[in-house]
Image (cartoon, grey):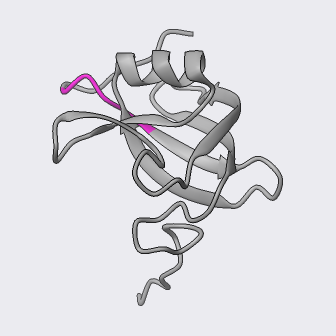
Amino acid sequence: MKIKYNADGLVPAIAQCAETGEVLMLAWMNEEALRLTLKEKRGVYFSRSRQKLWRKGESSGHIQELVSAHIDCDGDTILLKVRQTGAACHTGARSCFFQDFDA
């Protein structure tokens, strides 16, 4: 299936713990980030704020080892099943989804 990148050339990528199924984070990938992720077998993303590629854990050591990669039925979202070393969130939390939503 062909990946449907948005107008900025990006696609959302969900990182999920391969062992537990816990959703760890959501980031963005461009074509190069996806290619490098598959080649290097680790999470590589595109930073929208810095406008450049970043390898998860390059400064913190909290890397994501790629177990498998999947695309959704519409071709517009990537799911990466990973082995997370350390925290996935920049706050130090295991997952970026640790806050309750007050409706």
Left or right for 21, reference 12: right
Q: Is residue 86 above or below residue 72?
A: below
Q: Residue 90: image x %, image y %?
A: 40, 66
Q: Tell me the residue at 21%/42% (across/down).
A: 48
Name the residue nearer the viewer: 43 or 29. 43
Which residue of the protein is positioned furthest toward the top in this rendering? 2
Q: Is residue 56 above or below residue 38?
A: below
Q: Residue 60: image x %, image y %?
A: 45, 57
Secondary structure mostly seen in magenta is loop
When asked about the image quadrant of residue 85, the answer is: bottom right
Q: Tell me the residue at 70%/61% (across/down).
A: 22
Name the residue nearer the viewer: 32 or 74. 32
Judge whether residue 88 is colored magenta. no
Name the residue nearer the viewer: 94 or 59. 59
Q: Residue 63: image x %, image y %?
A: 57, 47
Left or right for 73, reference 89: right
Q: Tell me the residue at 37%/17% (across/down).
A: 31
When asked about the image quadrant of residue 94, the answer is: bottom right
Q: Residue 50: image x %, image y %?
A: 16, 43
Q: Tell me the residue at 46%/45% (across/down).
A: 56
Q: Give the range drawn in magenta.
A: 8-12
Q: In this view, does 48 lie above or below 99?
A: above
Please state, as top left, top right, bottom left or bottom right, where the N terminus lies in the image. Answer: top right
Left or right for 47, reference 87: left
